[in-house]
């Protein structure tokens, strides 16, 4: 059953989420929460969802970038974003670090700030250490769009939204972005002074 996605202005989105304890991981309750978060993510649809976005003050996030989400993008757009499919996985108590100084800017949005998008600079490469839903230590080195998703979701666990990192003059309605600027992001950044 899908959960309600809380919107900007809800205090849970601005708090540092608490780490899960060992006795809270790999439990029926946690697996149920993860299943409900996945149903919510797919219904939205989105590529990532953090527990604070469904009102839970926990360091828990899920990520899944399905191939079907790529069909509205051109090959050059996907390559520029270094966007590839990412299978479903769970991040518990993640620790993120940048892997180099390279940054890239692309427009992004958020399920908790619906109807808007803005250009956001992010690290191109990141490393993340985390626990999976069974409490097993994992690590990933990511680049491109996957690195962006990881940074976006982990920001949620630290009480940050993309609007905290965006280039303010690029903030626009999603309707304007998709209808006018999605195929001309460089021009939008030039015009809006980003």
Image (cartoon, rainbow, N blue to C red):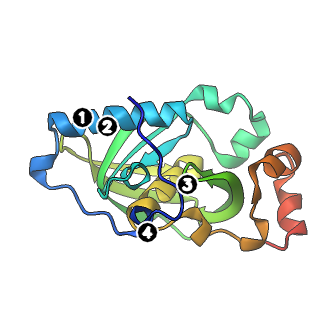
C-beta proximity under 8 Å, tags 2 and 4: no
In which quadrant of the rendered view does residue 95 lie? bottom left
Residue 87 or residue 160, whichever sits in front: 160
In the picture, the quarter occupied by the N terminus is: top left
Alpha-carbon span between mark 1 and mark 4: 25 Å
Residue 148 numbered mark, or none: 3
Label 2: element kind:
helix
Label 1: element kind:
helix
**Rendered location of residue 156, percent (x, y):** 44, 60
Alpha-carbon span between mark 3 and mark 2: 21 Å
Residue 42 numbered mark, or none: none
Q: Nearer the viewer, mark 1 or mark 4?
A: 4
Residue at the (51%, 67%) spot, across then down? 100
Q: Which of the two labelled residues, at mark 2 and mark 4, occupies the earlier sequence position?
A: 4
| Residue on which the image places disc 1 | 31
Q: Which of the two labelled residues, at mark 1 and mark 4, occupies the earlier sequence position?
A: 4
Is any atom of residue 86 visible in this view? Answer: no
Is any atom of residue 57 visible in this view? Answer: yes
| Residue on which the image places disc 2 | 34
Task: Say above or below: 141 vs 95.
Answer: above
Label 4: element kind:
helix
In the picture, the quarter occupied by the C terminus is: bottom right
**Rendered location of residue 137, percent (x, y):** 22, 48
| Residue on which the image places disc 4 | 14
Alpha-carbon span between mark 2 and mark 4: 21 Å
């Amino acid at each position: 059953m899908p959960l309600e996605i809380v919107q900007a202005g809800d205090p849970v989105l601005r708090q540092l989420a608490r780490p899960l304890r060992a006795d809270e991981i790999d439990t029926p309750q946690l697996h149920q929460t993860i299943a409900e978060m996945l149903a919510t993510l797919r219904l939205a649809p989105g590529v990532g969802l953090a527990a604070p976005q469904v009102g839970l003050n926990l360091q828990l996030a899920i990520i899944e970038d399905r191939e079907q989400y790529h069909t509205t993008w051109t090959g050059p757009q996907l390559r520029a974003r270094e966007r590839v499919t990412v299978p479903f996985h769970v991040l518990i108590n993640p620790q993120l670090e940048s892997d180099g100084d390279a940054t890239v800017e692309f427009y992004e949005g958020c399920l908790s700030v619906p109807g808007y998008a803005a250009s956001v600079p992010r690290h191109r490469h990141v490393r993340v250490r985390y626990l999976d839903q069974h409490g097993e230590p994992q690590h990933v080195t990511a680049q491109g769009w996957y690195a962006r998703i990881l940074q976006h979701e982990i920001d949620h666990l630290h009480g940050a939204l993309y609007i905290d990192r965006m280039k303010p003059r690029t903030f626009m309605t999603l309707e304007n972005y998709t209808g006018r600027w999605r195929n001309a992001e460089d021009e939008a950044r030039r015009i809006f002074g980003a």
